[in-house]
Amino acid sequence: MDKDKLAVLAVSESGFIFDPVTGHSYTANATGLKILELLKAGKEPDEIRSVLLDEYDSTEDEVSVDVNDFIENLKKYFLI
Amino acid sequence: MKLTVAVSGINTIDNPGPGAGICRALKESGMDVRTIGLAYDALEPGIYLDHIIDKSYIMPYPSGSREAFIERIKDIHSRESIDVIISALDAELPIYMDIEPVLKDIGIKMLIPSKEMFRLRDKLRLKELAEKIGVKAPEYMSCTSLADLHNAVNELGFPCMVKGPFYEAYKANSPGEAEGYFGKIAAAWGYPIIVQKFIQGDEYDVIGCGDGNGNDIGVFAIRKMTITKLGKVWNAVSIRNEKLIEATKRVVKGLSWRGGFEFEVLLEDKTQEIYVLEINPRFPAWVYFPAGCGINLPARMVQLLTGQDYDTHSDYKSGKLMIRYTNELVKDISDFEQISTFGETSEKGE
Amino acid sequence: MKKEYIKPYIRKQTAGVMNKFGVSYNKGHREEIEGFHIGDFTEKFGSPVFVLSEKVIRERYRKIYSYFSSKYPKAKMSWSYKTNYLDAVCSVLHQEGETAEVVSDFEYQKARRLGVPGKKIIYNGPYKPLESLIVAFKEGAMVNLDNFDEIIKAEEAAKKLDIKASVGIRVNMDTGVYPQWSRFGFNIENNNAFNAVKRIQHSEYLHLEGIHCHIGTFMMEPSAYKEAVKKIVQLMRRIEKEFEISISYLDFGGGFPSKNILKGTYLPPEVAIQPVENFIDAITDTLLEELEPKEYPEVYLETGRAIVDEAGWLITTVDAVKRLPDGTKSYIIDAGVNLLYTSAWYNYHVEIDREIHGAYENSIIYGPLCMNIDVVVESAFLPPLPKGTRLILSPMGAYNMTQWMQFIRYRPAVVMILEDGTVEQIRRPETLQDIVGPESVPEKLKRFQF
Ligand SMILES: Cc1ncc(COP(=O)(O)O)c(C=O)c1O
């Protein structure tokens, strides 16, 4: 996974994300920011899932579908 | 008396809304007014014009849930105590017509047409209206399919105008051109598409405001000098054409029009007869022009609604010129972050 | 304690997404229909399930009939069976006093079986088999003829019964609305209608009683009815004078719109769709202008959609969530175009049964069929729906429960919320036996071995 692109993103606590290289901006919610932070730290999808499960009240199934969907979205935006 | 007026349509883009012009007219009226911008997109330029718009909020789309729309207004009202809303977009007028009584109950006043008035000015009923006010309407046919289009151009001949249900109008000189425009408009705006007989002449525009009892509170006429590709006025000159003013007054009387409007007409070269093209149920984007010439319709509207004295005269000079220009502002990405993540601008000076 | 889980999202901000007409931003959710929990319907009757409201049907009918009858002395209404011919629905409307308007021998038989006497049936349509005409004449139904061949067929039927049968004619005309429905009935402008009357009056076995038209469905412009009434009254005058007869009924068919959203329209239906009163005014005002009180004929309306559409909902369940290769969010639900004939021209109102947090996205809703055309809603602005979410689609009451087809799945239950506050199943879900019942296999095909 290409993490360089993620590394340069300016992430604000408000959920606003600015990419100084491309000039694009994004919005994310708290869960999205959390996943982004974990990806930036080099975590693999499996590790991300278990971190989320520890922290949030959800099921394994739901979290894995959502993490996949989120990563698909990042791919769509060419962020990874 | 300090008043708070919320204004929509602050998208001063190449197809501009009148909101910024309304706010500027209010600010220059001498009244003590706080202006609130109601935007639908974080990049509407009005949001960033903090010298005329004190604070802006993002609204849910008017075509969506009524409840969400009302809730948002109530939320803004609880913080701003809005006295008056001036709605300035065709697309949101229907919802405001529906919720005006709710707004009235919570102390927000509006001067807008009723649904019946709104329907009477529908493009598809121009003929009826023209008869009622004693002007002409160009022959037209409404089309919802290519077969209808062929039928219509056969009937009306070339050149003809191909027009969208809300925006865009093109002059077509051949069946091929007509089909091209038809497809283009249908893709953008849907149906019905109107095919109208072409009449050689000049386009004129009258802005006005009706009090709902058949009286106007001021009118102002212009000749369009240049228009954009979308048919919007870019440069204009004020004129005094009594026939046109009289016709406008008949519109206000005939419909008992309530609120701002734009009466778009064409004067045929040969005969100087008035053809009505359209009546827009709101102020046009060039609403500041008459204000700059002493006919401040937004201010008069607010004064009427809040029980103050207001002028109703239409004494202005002909030969005043409106030059519209483009301009650039420099802002920071954090301003965009603020509006796009919180849905409102920060208070001035914060 | 663990934190509440909210589905993650990230969305690119695109300038210029601002379309003044926006997308349907549907923040609300709907937990019940007339006080009954959405989940209770599916638990008891399965998913999907069509829900109809007796109360709304009666209210819609009464609103239209009371206005119509207050504006014209001899106002009659006849229930358009094809719009929804479930027995329970027809019974509600027959209780209200509507007669039956049918367009096929099947519908005729269905009305008779329900207990509607032949005299209270209007028999329309472009194809009426000889045997069905014989029955209709024998039982005294009001028959409106569509074409010259049918006049001859009617004559034959009456001759067989050795009676002089009264008939009406269906006519069509230019009302300023396109496309013109010119394939049904006799055209007025080209004199066809007059010639048809001439032919009928010359017959030993037929005589003309009424004139019928149905200028189209989901009409947006009341003025079209004004045109229709004018032209039909003119025709009536001409016929009455020429043949010295008196026309006893005029029937203006159906066609009033419901608050559904036609594809390709931007204005919300509250504004785009004129109130039904305006349509009735167009008819009755023109009648009163054109007619002398002594000549008032009976006037029928066969309003279908405007009565029953808004009285119906479909509850359906999200079975899978899928992101398409182009990034579009899509959902697969358990009801498809096999059940939703009207999805071809409506953008249904979509509601969800619970509050869901998360970013709204434009999503496609697919049906369960193995067919590319099975798109139920092309674009709905929805939060991230988990599997199992119930969607409530509406208005659903008109045409779906007659034009649905049995294609690879069973048709689901239809239930009615009754005015006394109970819910009853008015059509049970289909079973294998319902579908294979009519079939038989030739003896030599009966055995196979793998
Ligand atoms: C003859 C006739 N009458 C009545 C109707 C009912 O029309 P609607 O549902 O548009 O009111 C139809 C429908 O097409 C029809 O063909």
Image (spheres, coloured by chain):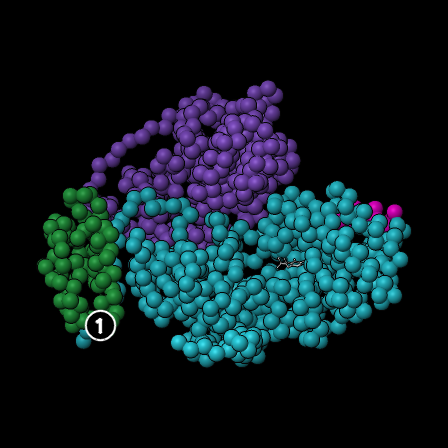
Chain colours: A green, B purple, C cyan
Is label 1's Cβ within 8 Å of ligand 1? no
- Foreground residue, C184 or C305? C184
- The residue that appears at 32% across and 62% down in the rendered structure is C322
Is C127 located above or below residue C21 in the figure? below
Is B71 located above or below residue C411 in the figure? above
Magenta-colored span: C232-242
Furthest-front residue in view? Answer: C444
Q: Chain of mark 1?
A: A
- The residue that appears at 40% across and 38% down in the rendered structure is B18
Q: Assign the magenta stretch its main secondary structure.
A: helix
Quarter of the rendered image showing ligand 1: bottom right
- Foreground residue, C71 or C329? C329
In the rendered image, residue B237, in percent from the top left (x then y), is placed at 45, 23
The answer, for residue C17, to whether it is visible in the render is yes
Badge 1 is on which residue? A60
Secondary element type, mark 1: helix
Q: Residues within 10 Å of mark 1 (few under 14, many from 20)?
A: few
Q: Is residue C156 left or right of residue C387?
A: right
Q: Quadrant of residue C255?
A: bottom right
- The residue that appears at 52% across and 24% down in the rendered structure is B202
- Foreground residue, C214 or B204? C214
Q: Is residue C372 left or right of residue B113?
A: left
Is B134 located above or below residue B189 in the figure? above
- Residue C236 among those drawn in magenta: yes
Under mark 1, the amino acid is Glu
Q: Quadrant of residue A42?
A: bottom left
Q: Quadrant of the N terminus of chain B?
A: top left
- The residue that appears at 88% across and 52% down in the rendered structure is C202
In the rendered image, residue C315, in percent from the top left (x then y), is placed at 45, 69
In the rendered image, residue B66, in percent from the top left (x then y), is placed at 44, 57
